[in-house]
């Protein structure tokens, strides 16, 4: 159904346009490069992927997020990567492209500290094809008034020590569009437990994301993987709901799916989310 809006409702949605959106993901454990530039080239010569998130909210034009990306090692201690992202939030859309670079410092045989930086460009705009207005001649409804473009930078680090993996990142260290610093910060901590002659991996983890434009997200997850081929995961997002996912990887080709169940008040407002990722790695 086309949107019928007034100037008042349009001004409300404009607050969304002025703030870069950061989609909440459930498959970050399988692809931390989505949040952290330091993950570029992490344990892979080449990794390409398509990642899509869609809301199950029962209204048209609910939030959608589509990402295409690739990263890999270019030298013994260096990695590079790129992401192209398209987000839609009702009437508004945001498009981004970024490039990332990482550098690894070895801390012994199995331990390492990685630093990553990223830089990109983005454009936010009003999708006029979704508008139905009462006065087509109203100058306040010109899409050009709500089109903004800018550049942003990011920073991240990753520490692997024994069976512990720590990620800290600021994907929006500075954004010229909003002229804000540290709009989004994220961190993850996981521990790898190996069993059955290292065929079985049990990985408990926690993840936190702080966004100036939305409430803090705090996750607890448990992932179980068999021979790095088949895995399942389950988790809880504080004050949000329950997450569940599964995936399979054969000869470098992988597919993963996760579903987020919103609970409480959110279940009546936002529904859940479908998330799918298709990847190739060698």
Image (spheres, rainbow, N blue to C red):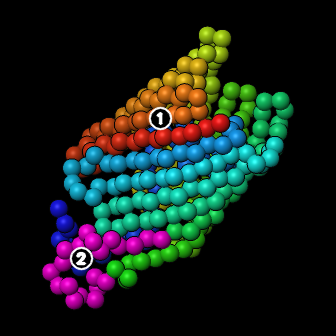
* Range shown magenta: 123-142
Judging depth in this view, the residue of 95 and 70 nearest the camera is: 70
Please tell me how crowded label 2 is: few (under 14), some (14-19), or many (20+) other residues with Cα within 10 Å. Answer: few
Residue positioned 43% across, 65% down in the render: 94
Q: Quadrant of the C terminus?
A: top right
The residue beneath circle 2 is 8
Taking the image as shown, residue 213 lies to the left or right of residue 77, namely left
Q: Is residue 7 visible?
A: yes
**Numbered disc 2: secondary structure:** helix
- Whole-percent x, y for residue 99 in the image: 64, 59
**Which quarter of the figure has residue 271?**
top left
Taking the spot 33% from the left edge, 71% from the top edge, the residue there is: 127
Q: Residues within 10 Å of mark 1 (few under 14, many from 20)?
A: some
Q: Residue furthest right?
A: 108
Q: Is residue 155 visible?
A: no
Q: Find residue 208 and report its horizontal and vertical position in percent.
A: 52, 44
Dot label at residue 255: 1
Q: Is residue 98 magenta?
A: no
Residue at the limit of the structure toward the top, as seen here: 196
Q: Looking at the image, which residue is at 37% across and 61% down?
A: 88
Disc 1 and disc 2: Cα gap in Å? Answer: 43 Å
Quadrant of the image containing the N terminus: bottom left
Residue 30 falls in image quadrant:
top right
Dot 1: element: strand
Instruction: Write the residue at 46% across / 56% down.
Output: 22
Location of residue 199 in the rendering, given as x and y in whole percent from the top left corner: 61, 16
Give above or below for 94 relative to 117.
Answer: below
* Residue 19, percent from left and from top: 44, 67
Q: Quadrant of residue 136?
A: bottom left
Report the side of 61 relative to 101 (left or right).
left
Among numbered discs 1 and 2, the one appearing first in the sequence: 2
Q: Is residue 120 above or below residue 168?
A: below
């Amino acid at each position: 159904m086309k949107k019928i809006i007034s100037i008042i409702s349009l001004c409300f949605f404009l607050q969304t346009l002025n703030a870069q959106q950061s989609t909440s993901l459930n498959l970050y454990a399988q692809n931390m490069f989505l949040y952290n530039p330091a993950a570029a080239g992490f344990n892979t010569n080449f990794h390409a992927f398509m990642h899509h998130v869609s809301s199950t909210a029962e209204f048209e034009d609910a939030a959608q997020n589509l990402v295409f990306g690739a990263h890999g090692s270019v030298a013994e201690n260096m990695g590079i990567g790129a992401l192209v992202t398209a987000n839609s939030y009702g009437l508004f859309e945001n498009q981004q492209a970024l490039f990332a670079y990482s550098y690894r410092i070895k801390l012994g045989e199995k331990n390492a500290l990685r630093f990553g930086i990223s830089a990109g460009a983005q454009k936010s705009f009003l999708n006029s094809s979704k508008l139905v207005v009462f006065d087509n001649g109203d100058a306040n409804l010109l899409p050009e008034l709500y089109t903004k473009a800018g550049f942003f930078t990011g920073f991240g680090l990753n520490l692997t020590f024994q069976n512990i993996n720590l990620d800290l990142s600021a994907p929006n260290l500075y954004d010229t569009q909003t002229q804000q610093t540290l709009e989004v910060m994220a961190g993850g901590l996981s521990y790898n437990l190996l069993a059955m002659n290292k065929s079985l991996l049990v990985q408990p983890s926690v993840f936190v994301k702080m966004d100036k434009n939305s409430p803090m997200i705090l996750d607890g997850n448990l992932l179980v993987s068999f021979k790095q081929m088949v895995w399942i995961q389950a988790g809880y997002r504080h004050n949000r709901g329950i997450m569940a996912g599964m995936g399979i990887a054969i000869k470098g080709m992988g597919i993963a799916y996760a579903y987020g169940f919103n609970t409480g008040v959110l279940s009546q407002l936002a529904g859940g989310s479908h998330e799918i990722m298709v990847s190739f790695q060698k």
